[in-house]
Image (cartoon, rainbow, N blue to C red):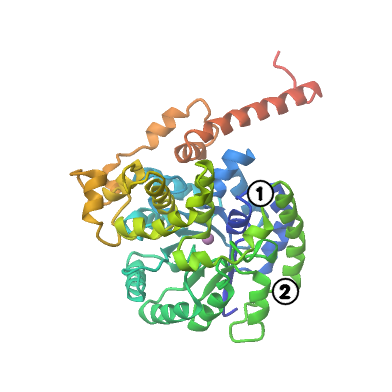
Amino acid sequence: MPKVGITDTILRDGHQSQAATRMKFSQMEPMLEKLDKVGYYSLECWGGATFDSCLRFLNEDPWERLRKLRKAMPNTKLQMLLRGQNLLGYKHYSDDVVEFFVKKAVENGIDIIRCFDALNDLRNMQTAVTATKKYGGKAEVAMSYTISDVHTEDYFVKLAADIQKMGADLICIKDMANLLLPYSAYSLIKRMKKETDLPIVLHTHDTTGTGAMTLLKAIEAGADVVDTCISALGNGTSQPTTESMVATLQGTEYDTGLDLVALTEIAAYFRKVAEELTNEGWRDPARVLATDANTLIYQVPGGMLSNLIGQLKQANAMDKYYDVLAEVPRVRKDCGLPPLVTPTSQIVGTQAVMNILGGERYKMVTKETKALLRGEYGRLPAPVDPEVKKKCIGDDKVITHRPADDIPPELDKYREEIRDYYQQEEDVLSYAMFPQVAPKFFQYRQAAQLQVDNTMLNKGEMTMPV
Ligand code: CO
């Protein structure tokens, strides 16, 4: 039994972080049998942005992709990333939709559901966790890691204990911005091991160049599983590389037991895929592999920086880049110190841009900022600045209950709305996640099926009814 488990992210976060989530199933397929034989703790291969990307850009049914992954990799635990009550979309869903989504994810092949909430509000994850266990999956609850006056080591140790109480099977530290430094990781995980009994998983990135060091110190402190990515899409904005970690631990008490030769064969194949993604314009090696010290200073996640640059370029205001960068932590503080991860990273980032470009802070306020301040995303980690609150939402009611408590069952309504396209139960969920995008995919699918029928007809393989 290996001492440290490895979750490889090559099929999800690796290409999401380095290549705009554009890896197609056909690019994964040739290596699935080999990946299945490696002996990973698990393979992260679904959820996050892959679902959206399948429907929006790749004309793939995400459910069909999952079934194919499952079939090709019967021996490895398949893992997905889920945004709690938001599932894979950008709003809160009713409990019946959450439960049905989890049921279908497990039925189609997912073993481990890593669930997170941008505000670390456990109420937003409870339905997903309960459903995961009900349908036979493993519930991994992630703490969105950040640093602030309230996000101290004590905060995360207490949160870990609460996660254990809510019935999770594993606890993950999700360090999406690569802010967790090696010695802080050591100290935090030591304490988590003492105060909880669950396996501890660490997910980080290498944006700030500290990723592999952080994983190593985490392992020394007792982390049970770490996320790494096959070198072809590893390091930089992605996870530290699998081969380097496996080699580092070989022959020590932390030996992963994985075969380096098999891993290098897999890496050689995915290097070609990475090159294809680069040639198609989805991956800029110089950018994704650069070490980004701004993240350490401004605590702005790497992915968010590229969004900000995009917004400023669109507004022809790149000269305001550093002003916006400095405004981000101020907006974050005004809004009760949310960790910066989807969707709060977009909300805070966009508001910071508006505050700078508008010439006056909170002169323009997005509806998402207002919703955040009204408690509609969940409980904020710290009190909101009273003046900012007054200026943005006046005397609007602020909710303190779980936001999804206000959402009546929605599944039947979604079912009704896509009746014309319905081919499988899962279609309802694709539509619920992406109501604008999914119908276009369903139309594409219908047209493709029609075309296949016609070709077969022309070849005489199918006869018309007489
Ligand atoms: Co990540």
Q: Which secondary structure lies at badge 1?
A: loop
- The residue wearing badge 2 is 260
Q: x, y (%) of residue 354?
A: 39, 45
Q: List the single residue furthest toward the top.
A: 466
Is residue 373 at all visible to an observer of this figure? yes
Image quadrant in which you'd find residue 371: top left
- Which mark identifies residue 282? 1
For the image shown, how many numbered marks are present on the structure?
2
Look at 69% across and 53% down and name the residue there.
Answer: 28
Q: Is 310 rendered above or below residue 263?
A: above
Q: x, y (%) of residue 155?
A: 33, 71
- Which mark identifies residue 55? none
Look at 38% across and 43% down and name the residue there.
Answer: 358
Along the viewing direction, whichever of 346 and 17 lies nearer the viewer: 346
Task: State how far apart marks 2 and 1 are (Cα).
Answer: 28 Å
In this rendering, the label closer to the viewer, 2 or 1: 1
Q: x, y (%) of residue 291?
A: 59, 67
Is residue 99 at all visible to an observer of this figure? no
How would you rate the neighbour count of disc 2 (Cα within 10 Å): few for under 14, some for 14-19, many for 20 or more?
some
How would you rate the neighbour count of disc 1 (Cα within 10 Å): few for under 14, some for 14-19, many for 20 or more?
some
Q: x, y (%) of residue 450?
A: 67, 25
Along the viewing direction, whichever of 373 and 294 lies nearer the viewer: 294
